[in-house]
Amino acid sequence: MTQAKNVLGTPLEPCSMSPLTGFYRDGCCNTGVQDLGLHLVCIVATDEFLEFSAEVGNDLSTPMPEYAFPGLNEGDRWCLCVQRWKQALEAGKAPQVVLESTHMSSLEFVDLEDLQQYSVTA
């Protein structure tokens, strides 16, 4: 199995171990056939984004212990579905992105230039 690459073409770096993120809960924005939501973009949550996400039906702030989900707070890193990030971008609410931890497959849905505009240093 080859190591996943990020949008910069280098090895995919972990996004967050606390809270533990990733579709596979491995801390990375890895993807596979089971990941129908495509959790590819490593974001840094903001209150503005979390409010937006809840308004469009994806409440990421409320803890869900039955899924070992602590709920996100401003400043938390999280592997977000690429389409949700694109939706937030189009609404002017996109959170910052950690390019080194964002899976290269996200480039099938969003432009690198848009991701770079919101990039934050790992």
Image (tube, rainbow, N blue to C red):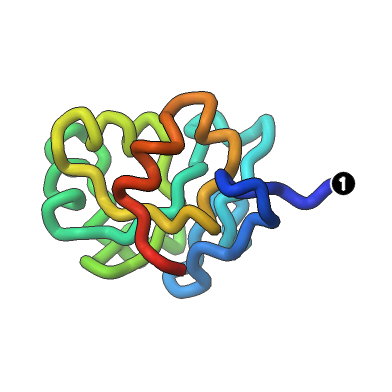
- Taking depth in this image into account, of 51 and 113 the one nearest to the observer is 113
Picture coordinates of residue 71 (x, y %)? 30, 62
Q: Is residue 94 left or right of residue 35?
A: left
Picture coordinates of residue 19 (x, y %)? 43, 69
Q: Amino acid at mark 1?
A: Met
Quadrant of the rendered image containing residue 105: top right
Q: Is 85 drawn above or below residue 100 in the view shown?
A: above
Q: Is residue 92 left or right of residue 113?
A: left
Q: Is residue 37 left or right of residue 49?
A: right
- Taking depth in this image into account, of 65 and 105 the one nearest to the observer is 105
What residue is rendered at 29% in x and 63% in y? 72
Picture coordinates of residue 39 (x, y %)? 49, 42
Q: Is 6 drawn above or below residue 47 in the view shown?
A: above
Residue farthest to the top? 108
Q: Is 121 drawn above or below residue 52 in the view shown?
A: below
Dot 1: few (<14), some (14–19), or many (≥20) neighbours within 10 Å?
few
What residue is rendered at 64% in x and 56% in y? 12
Residue receiving disc 1: 1
Q: Is 47 drawn above or below residue 86 in the view shown?
A: below
